[in-house]
Amino acid sequence: MKLKLHELLMIARGPENFNGQGVSVAGPLQKLFYQDLPASTAFDLVPLTEAVEKEVGRFEEVKKKLFEKYGDKNEENNMIEIKNENLKKFQEEINPVLEKEVELPDVRIKKSHLDEVKLSAGDIVKLKQFIEQ
């Protein structure tokens, strides 16, 4: 199964503003991973989660290098911030990365296995390509 990197990031960790101003929250896949599921479904989620974590890690390394390239360290909060004059250059480099397709294991979760799982409608929308009717 192929997804664009920005889609994978939404599944993995939820919404984030990629200029570093946002707050990362648990994404739908993380929520699902820690639910009580039938053993076969939980087993199937492991390679998917591992593949997602690998791709997120690769992205984080690229993003970190771009922050170092275009950003300045804020001594007050010890964070690297992209100044307005560098924001366009930063976006020009990071946007093509976010559009890259990544290959994930083709995992399908039976809809009936989610009956007792608490997920939002937004989570379900993001996970729909993994849910078998």
Image (tube, rainbow, N blue to C red):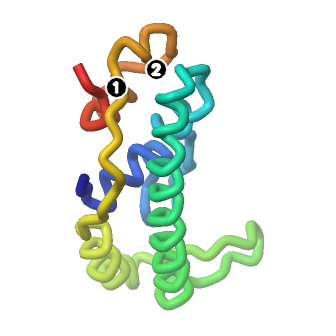
Q: Residues within 10 Å of mark 1 (few under 14, many from 20)?
A: some
How many angstroms separate mark 1 from mark 2 (CA)? Answer: 7 Å
Q: Is residue 122 above or below residue 46?
A: above
Quarter placement of the C terminus:
top left
Amino acid at dot 2: Leu
* Front in this rendered view, residue 121 or 29: 29
Question: In the image, what residue type sits under mark 1?
Answer: Ile
Q: Position of residue 89 (x, y in %)?
A: 32, 84
User: In the image, 129: left or right of 24?
Assistant: left
Q: Residue at x 46, y 43 (%)?
A: 14
- Pick out the residue farthest to the top: 116
**Where residue 23 sits in the image (x, y, percent)?**
56, 49
Question: Helix, strand, or loop for circle 2?
Answer: loop
The answer to whether residue 84 is above or below residue 115 is: below
User: Which callout, 1 or 2, points at the residue further toward the start of the chain?
Assistant: 2
Residue at 24 percent across and 65 percent down: it is 101
Question: Does 54 sit above or below residue 24?
Answer: below
Q: As drawn, which residue projects farthest toward the front?
A: 40
Q: Nearer the viewer, residue 121 or 103?
A: 103
Q: Do callouts 1 and 2 mark residues in contact (Cβ within 8 Å)?
A: yes
- Image location (x, y in percent) of residue 102: 30, 64
Outermost residue on the bottom side: it is: 69
Q: Residue at image x 25%, y 75%?
A: 96
**Residue to which mark 2 is pinned:** 119
Q: Which mark is residue 105?
A: none
Quadrant in the picture for residue 30: top right
Q: At 56% across and 86% down in the image, what residue appears?
A: 68
Residue underneath mark 1: 124
- Mark 2 surroundings: few (<14), some (14-19) or many (≥20) residues within 10 A: some
